[in-house]
Amino acid sequence: EQLVLFYQPKYNLSKDEFDGFEALVRWNHPTKGLVSPSKFISVAEESNLISEIGLWVLKKSCIFIKEFNEQHNKDFIVAVNASAVQLMDDGFEDSVFNVIKETGVNPQHLELEITESLFVSSLDLVFEKLNFFRNMEISIALDDFGTGYSSLTYLKTLPITTLKLDKTFIDDIVSSEVSLTIVKSVIQIAKSTGLKIIVEGVETKEQLNILSTLGCDYIQGFYFSKPIPEEEIATLFAKDNV
C-alpha cells in the first residue's frame, strides 16, 4: 500500500486548455519519502513485479479518469506507461480488456505509452498487440521519441496515434538552432502522417511560444503543472474553470 499515483496534466494548445493526464507511479516509502520510478521500476522488472504494479496503475488510472470525466462532463484521456515486460507478457491483452470491463471506462479515454526499445527484436509481435488495442479504440503513444532507436519505419508501420518528443530536445530549443530544426521536423512529420504530437519538458514561456508557432498539439511540463496527486487536481482545475 505504499505506491501512489501522480497525474501530470496535458495542455492542448489549439484549444488553449487542459484535456488529459499522464499517470505516474511513485513509491511513498515510510522513511525515504517519495521515491522516483527511475529508482525502482528496473528492479520491479527484474523481479517480475512490474506486471502486477502495471496492472494496479492501469486500474487506478481507469477509475480516476472515468470519475473525473463524469464529474466534469469531459472527455479527457489518461496515458498509462506500459513497460516492455508488461507488453510482451502473453496475458497483457486480456488484462487490459478485463480492466476496461471491470471499471467501465470508455476505452477512448485510455492511452498506452510504449517505448521504442520494444521494437528492436520483436516488431511483428508488438504490431499484433498494438493492433489489438487499437481495435478496442485505445490510443497508442510512442514515448521518448528521438532518444533511443528512433526510426521513421515505426511511424509508417505501427498503429500508433501519438508521438511524444523527449524533453532533451526542448531544453535548449531557445538557444540551439539544431534542436529547433529537429523539433520543427518531427512536428511536421507527425502532422503529415496523421499523428498527434506531444512535447514533454516545457518549462519556460519562451519554449512554449516557439512550440506554439511550430504548430505543436500538446504540451507537458512544469510550465503548466508538475505531476500532482489526485487530491490536488481539483484545486488546479478550479483555476481554469474545468
Image (cartoon, rainbow, N blue to C red):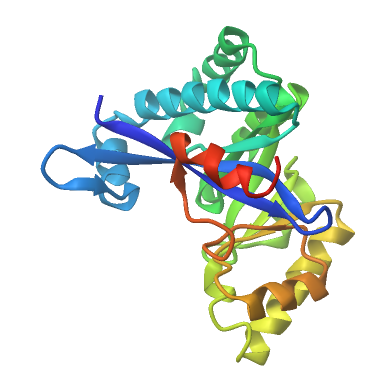
Image quadrant holding the C terminus, namely top right
Can residue 145 be seen here? The reply is yes
Can residue 132 be seen here? The reply is no
Residue 20's image quarter? top right
Q: x, y percentage for residue 64?
A: 54, 25
Q: x, y percentage for residue 38?
A: 32, 52
The residue located at (71%, 20%) in the rendering is 106
Q: x, y percentage for residue 148?
A: 52, 63
The residue located at (77%, 74%) in the rendering is 185
Residue 145's image quarter? bottom right
- Looking at the picture, tell me which residue is in the foreground, 140 or 202: 202
Instruction: Relative to 160, say whether 12 is above or below.
Output: below
Residue 76's image quarter? top right
The residue located at (25%, 47%) in the rendering is 35
Q: x, y percentage for residue 180?
A: 69, 83
Instruction: Relative to 45, say whether 240 is above or below.
Output: below
Image quadrant holding the N terminus, namely top left
Q: Which residue lies furthest to the left in this view?
A: 31
